[in-house]
Image: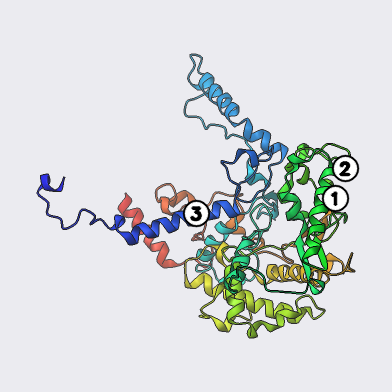
Amino acid sequence: MNDRAGITCKSENSHEEIKQTALKRDEEQVQAIVTHLNQTMTDPFDIDAHPPCLINISTGMHATREVQDSLLSAVNEGENMYRKFVNSALSVDQIGSFYSPITKSKLKTFEHMNAKTTHKCKSGEIITGHINPEIVFRRALVLANSRDDVTIDSILSLPLGPIPVSLFHEDGTMRKSCKSDLVKQFENEVSPILSLPDFDPSLTTYIRDGMAIVQCMDAKKHKTFGEIALAYCNYLTSCFTKAHTVADVFDRYDVKHSTKSAERERRTKVTAHAKVFQVIEGRNVPDWKKFLSVKDNKQALFLSFSCRTSSLFGIGKKSVYKVLKDAALDFSDLYNLGDSDTETAISCSRRFVARLYDQKKNYASCHQDINKLRVKLATSKDSSLVRLPPSEAALRQHILCASFQTKILHAFGLAKPPLPSPLEYGWKSFKDSWHPVLFEGNMSADFLHDLVCLCRPKPCMYRLMFLPRIRILQERSYACPYRRGFRIKFYLSVRLLMRFAN
């Protein structure tokens, strides 16, 4: 093609995007996407692994019956609205006008499952709805430059919405990170060997993940629960040739109100499809995956205890391990996380979280105050709200949850260890189960009425004069020129634009 066009080119592969550097970069990006889909999301193409109900492949949240019925009937609902419009506006009788507004569909989606907040409007009306923290964050940054009663510090010192998005998804479920990343980091610290050195079995203890062993058992080879139990015991006794003590650790399912209930609901919430079986030795084994997806079924097999905390958005276990390894002495107080000295552990944890978000220590002076670090990161670069550290109110509750989990891990050698009430460590009881406390106190949206309130008791003269012609001013982040704090320079520029528009 180049020869026919008379173009002289030194190389056929001269385009930047087909050079080896670009190809290598593109391949790494593709593999990163594939890894993210495989490790943190539900595979949309693996039909056999899908639960009976609809789920959010990103968070794993199961749709409620109301949302599921609404989404599955979306096509029929759209066809009905189409026929209604045609029969009213395009028919011979012309019952309705072609230019009349079309009624919005009332379909319910996963967004309707997000946490709702109660807000008092300027008119005095109390409404309940969803608040998008990212929209509030962006508008608040603009609003802080045009109002005297609002500053960036006051806005970011509190959670912007009902959900701290750096710790939780918008539907209130906890964020997760890939657990296997930490194991890979540990493997990099040791050298592999072909065989274990000589050791004394009488002084050896073998600790296994009991639930992982049960999950890997091939239930199709066993017809009854008795055969499964026998196979498990045979496998267990075979381990005593290498160790004097074999400890199989399971999650604890005999506790009615467990702090892991929120995580279990996220994993196995199957609503009306859940089936509970009575485990009898001679009874046939049902579908193994579905059987183990129900907590009550597991309770009939295993006893132990565990709990759960959330993860920070965009910060995986690799980053945590790297920071902790490079500055272990700086965060030695983390050893007290599960002890009675809670305030010391909280102070050290705050500095550790600040280091995770500021690993180059550009704002080291703000590491003692997480709210100041939020302001620095928000004003120094264009970051979304989800990539900012949580506020002090949200971070404190998260640290308390981590402290409670550490207490449980310290007592792993005790059967049914005595533990304090989770109410003292960032948990709350709701509908017979424990859920994490997102934060305590107010949120910024409570005093940012201009950003979340949509009611207008009176028509604004500014809106009537300028918005019909100057579309760029339709954002609610700009204050009305008849209110205080509006810049005269901006007002004059609008008048000048109006003159040119005419």
Q: Are marks 1 and 3 in contact (CB under 8 Å)?
A: no
Query: Residue 177, image x and y in percent?
Result: 62, 61
User: Residue, x 52% and y 70% (percent of image)?
Assistant: 378
Q: Which mark is residue 301?
A: 1
Q: Which mark is residue 33?
A: 3
Q: Residue 242 carries which label?
A: none
Q: Do the residues labelled 1 and 2 touch (CB within 8 Å)?
A: yes
Quadrant of the rendered image containing residue 198: bottom right
Q: Do the residues labelled 3 and 2 touch (CB within 8 Å)?
A: no
Q: Count the numbered circles shown.
A: 3
Query: Residue 214, image x and y in percent?
Result: 76, 51
Q: What residue type is labelled 2?
A: Val
User: Residue, x 84% and y 60% (percent of image)?
Assistant: 304
Q: Judging from the image, what secondary structure is the residue with disc 1 in? A: loop
Q: Judging from the image, what secondary structure is the residue with disc 2 in? A: loop
User: Residue, x 20% and y 53% (percent of image)?
Assistant: 12
